[in-house]
Image (cartoon, rainbow, N blue to C red):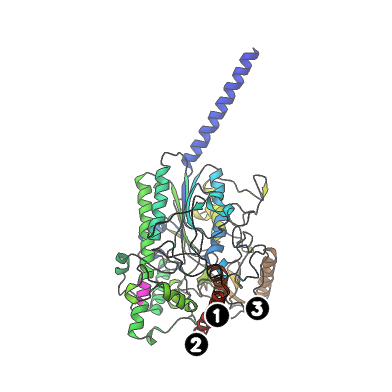
Amino acid sequence: MKHNRHFTKIVCLSLLTLSTSITVLAADNVRPNIVVLVADDWGFTDVGAFGGEIATPHLDDMARRGMRFSNFHVAASCAPTRAMLLTGVDNHRAGIGNLRETMPQAHLGKPGYQGSLEKRVVTVATLLKDSGYRTYITGKWNVGNEPYNLPNQRGFDRSIVQGDTGSDNWEPNKRYLPHFPKVNWYENGKIAVMPAEFYSTEFFVDKTLGYLDADAQSNKPFFAYLGFQANHVPIQAPQSFIDKYRGRYAQGWTALRQARRDKAVELGIISKETAMRTMSTTQDWTALSEQEKYHQARQMEVYAAMADAMDHHVGRLVSHLKKTGQFDNTVFVFLSDNGAEASDYDEAQIWLKTQYTQATEKLGSKGAYGIPGPSWASASVSPLYTYKFYAGEGGIRVPLIISGVPGMTQNKIHHSLAHVTDIVPTLLEIAKVAQPGSLYKGQSIEPLQGSSLLPALQGTTAQIHAPDQAIGYELSGSQALFKGDLKLVKNIAPVGDGAWHLYDMTRDPGETKDLQNQMPDVFKLMQADYAAYAKSNGILDMPEGYNPVRQVVINSFVNYWIPTYKTPVLAALSTLLLISLAWFGLRRRRSK
C-alpha cells in the first residue's frame, strides 16, 4: 500500500506538471505577438493618417485597422523617451534626466542623470521574456553602453543595436557629429562587426526577419522592438524614393504647414477651430532666391523619401508575418521618439564640410548630409508649436498608432491625454502579464507610473488619466505639466521666453491663447504641482547661461576631441576651434 501510495503521488505530480505545461502552452498560443516600431524625429503630421502627404500606406493601414492617439506625449529627445518606453518610469527616475549629448557636465553622474538606465528599473522586454516571450531588438538603443545596460542584460534574447544617438545611414561606422570617437554597435552584448555599407532601415528589418526565421519553430509568442534611424539627421534615402517627391515641395514650408493642418482637421485628428502661430525660427519662403528654394525643397524631398522608405520596409515585415501566418495574432505599436528635428548645425559646419557634402543634387546619397532645419520642422509638426528639444506640443506630441489588439475598436481616433509611460502597462495587460510593483525577483525597483491604454483601445473608456492627475515633464530646462485638458509650459531660449504659460490642449493644441490671466488660481496651483513633481523626481536646475547648442559643442570636446587628440597642442587648437564654431553658430542664429 505504501508503494502504491508513493506511485500514485508520482503520477499525480506528473499529471499536474503536464497540466501546467499545457496551460502555459495554451496561454502562449493565444497571447499575441507584439511589434513596437519607433521612428526617429517624426513630426505630428508626418504620417498620412495624421494629415501628411508623405506616402506611408502600411502605417496608414495600421491606423485603419486600429486606433490613432491624437494627444500622445513623449520627451523632446530620443534617450529620455526610449527610457520611458522601455521601463514605464519617468526618465529622471530611470536614470536619463537628459540626453547625454546635451547634458551639462555638472549634471552628469548625479542621481537621475547617469545618461543610462538605472539598475533599479526593469524593462518590458525582461517582464515579457520572463513570462514566456521570445524577445528581439534591432536599431537604435541609446539608453546606455555599460555591459549591464546592453540589450542582452535587459531582457532581449537576440539584438543588434547602436548604442549612440545616431550615425550615418549608408556607412554604419561613420559618425554624424563628433560626439564620440566611434559609433558603438553591439550584437548580443558584444562589439558588433558591421558591414562597410548598408541602408539602416533595410538592415534593421532584415535582422528582425532573420531572428523570426531562426526561431520559427518556437511555440512562444514574440516581442520585437525596431528602433529606426529614420528620420534622424543626416537625412538620407535611396534615390528611387527621392525621385518620387521631385517638385512636391516647391510651394515651401508655410504652404505645407497650412495644408497639413487642414488635412488633419478633415481626418478628425484636430478640431476645425485649431489655430496656429508662426514660429520665430521659420524663414520667409518668398524672400529666398530661386536657387535657395530649389535647395530647400530638395531637403524636404529627401526627408519625405526617408520616411517613405521606412514605411516600405515596415511593409516587408508585415508581408513576412502574413506569409508565416503570424499577422492576425500580432499587435503593432508605432510612435515617434520626439517631434521633428530643427537644428541647423551651424556650429558644426566646419566639421561637416570635412566629412560630407551638402551639394543639392547629392542630398540623400552616400557622403551627403541633409538637414530639414527649423522651417521644414514647423511643417512636420503642424499645427503645433516648437519642435525637438522643447516642451511645446511640436516637441513632445507625436503620432501613436496601435493595431491588432483583440477586441479593439477599429479606425478610431482617441483624443484624451496619453503618455509614453502608458505603453508598458498596456503591453503587459495585452500579454496577460502582471505588473511587478516595487519588488521584482527580490530586488527593489521603480514601480510603473503609466496607465494601461487597453480600456481605450477596447472602447470602454473615453479618459485614460483622471482629470485631477498631474503629469509632469522636464528636459534641459524646458518644463510642462498636464492636468485634465490643461497644460502649463515653459520653454527656454532661444525658442522660448523662459516664462510659464497656460493652454487648453483640447481647444488649442497650437498653444496660441494663454489662459493664465483668465484662470489665475489654476495657473498658480499647476505651478505648485510642477514644483512637487520636480522635487519628487530629483530634477536639477540648469546652470546659468545654459544653451543646448553650446553644450553639444562642449560635450563633443570632452568626449571626442580630447580622447582623439591627446597632445596639449592639439587639444588647445581643438578648444579654440570649438569655441570659434560655437561663437560663429550663435552669431548666425542671432542675425537671422
Q: Which residue is mark 2?
A: 591
Above or below 279: residue 135: above
Residue range corresponding to the magenta coloring: 297-301
Q: Which residue is mark 3?
A: 544
Circle 3 Cα neighbour tier, 10 Å, few/some/many (<14 / 14–19 / ≥20)? few
Main secondary structure found in the magenta portion = helix
Q: Nearer the viewer, mark 1 or mark 2?
A: 1
Instruction: Tell me whether the residue at label 1 lies in contact with that at label 2, contact meaning CB atoms closer than 8 angstroms.
Output: no
Circle 1 Cα neighbour tier, 10 Å, few/some/many (<14 / 14–19 / ≥20)? few
Question: Which of the two labelled residues, at mark 1 and mark 3, occupies the earlier sequence position?
Answer: 3
- The answer to whether any part of residue 428 appears in the image is no
The reply, left or right, for residue 365 in relation to residue 36 is left
Q: Residue at x 47, y 79 (%)?
A: 346
Mark 1–mark 3 distance (CA, rounded to whole Å): 22 Å
Q: Amino acid at mark 2?
A: Ser
Which percent across, then down, holds residue 69? 49, 61
Which percent across, then down, holds residue 573? 54, 78
Magenta region includes residue 298: yes
The reply, left or right, for residue 217 in relation to residue 493 is left
SS class, disc 3? loop
Instruction: Tell me whether the residue at label 2 lies in contact with that at label 3, contact meaning CB atoms closer than 8 angstroms.
Output: no
